[in-house]
Amino acid sequence: MSYLFNALSLLIELAFDAVATLFLVRLLAEACRADFHNPLSQFVYRYTNPVLAPIRRVLPNWRRINLAALLVTWLAMLLKRLLLVALLGVAPRPLGLLLLSLADLIDFVLVFYLVVVFGWSLLSMFAVDRRQPVLRLVGAIVEPLLRPLRGKLVAGNLDFSPMVVMIGLLLARLLLAAPLFDLGARLAMGG
């Protein structure tokens, strides 16, 4: 039974994380004003807009933050958590479940940024075409995090700002997401 549970939970996590990634990229691309003419940006827009358009009529953007995309991303985390808990056969308390899904969302965003910043910094060591659509989109998403530190942490020809940003993201996971997850787990189980 545990092998089947592990396989089902993996499939559930992959499916909902893929959906959450799509809407998170939409959220971040809009917030960072990524180039809309980028084919990857158009792909993300094309597949997220049918879901977001009706929600945006009720929940408009706040500044450059697409609240509808944020809501859908959080709902994906909530549904994922609900299905995983249902597989266990446990009935969690609603407040704890909501807090767990919020912790999942925060952790998901932090891990997403960790992967993107690491990939961006790794690719910056090689001679790659900066006009490539993925690199343009990733560059637009990463730039707001790196801009405050860019050029301030240079030793020789190495810029250590991506490493400092990644350490900050790891600390945020430990100091923000993990305590929220623990609190949500306690509330969900009635402790």
Image: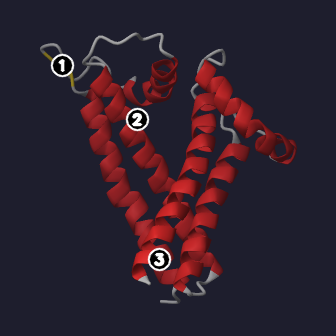
In x, y percent, where is residue 3?
40, 76
Q: Which residue is mark 1?
A: 158
The front one of 7 and 92 is: 7
Give the residue type at disc 1: Leu
Disc 2 versus disc 1: distance between alpha carbons? 19 Å
Kindly identify the residue that appears in the image at 80 percent across and 40 percent down: 50
Q: Is residue 147 left or right of residue 20?
A: left
The reply to whether dot 3 and dot 1 touch (C-beta < 8 Å) is no
Q: Where does the N terminus fall, quadrant-wise?
A: bottom left
Does any portion of residue 62 appear in the rendered image?
A: no
Residue 136 vs 49, above or below: the answer is above
Does any portion of residue 115 appear in the rendered image?
A: yes
* Structural crowding at the residue carrying mark 2, measured as other residues with C-alpha within 10 Å and reported as few (<14), some (14–19) or many (≥20): some
Give the residue type at disc 2: Val
Kindly identify the residue that appears in the image at 64 percent across and 65 percent down: 79
Q: Which residue is mark 2?
A: 116
In x, y percent, where is residue 143?
44, 24
Q: Earlier in the sequence, mark 3 or mark 2?
A: 3
The reply to whether dot 3 and dot 2 touch (C-beta < 8 Å) is no
Element on which disc 3 rests: helix
Q: Which residue is mark 3?
A: 5
Q: Is residue 77 left or right of residue 184?
A: right
Give the residue type at disc 3: Phe
Residue 190 vs 174, above or below: the answer is below
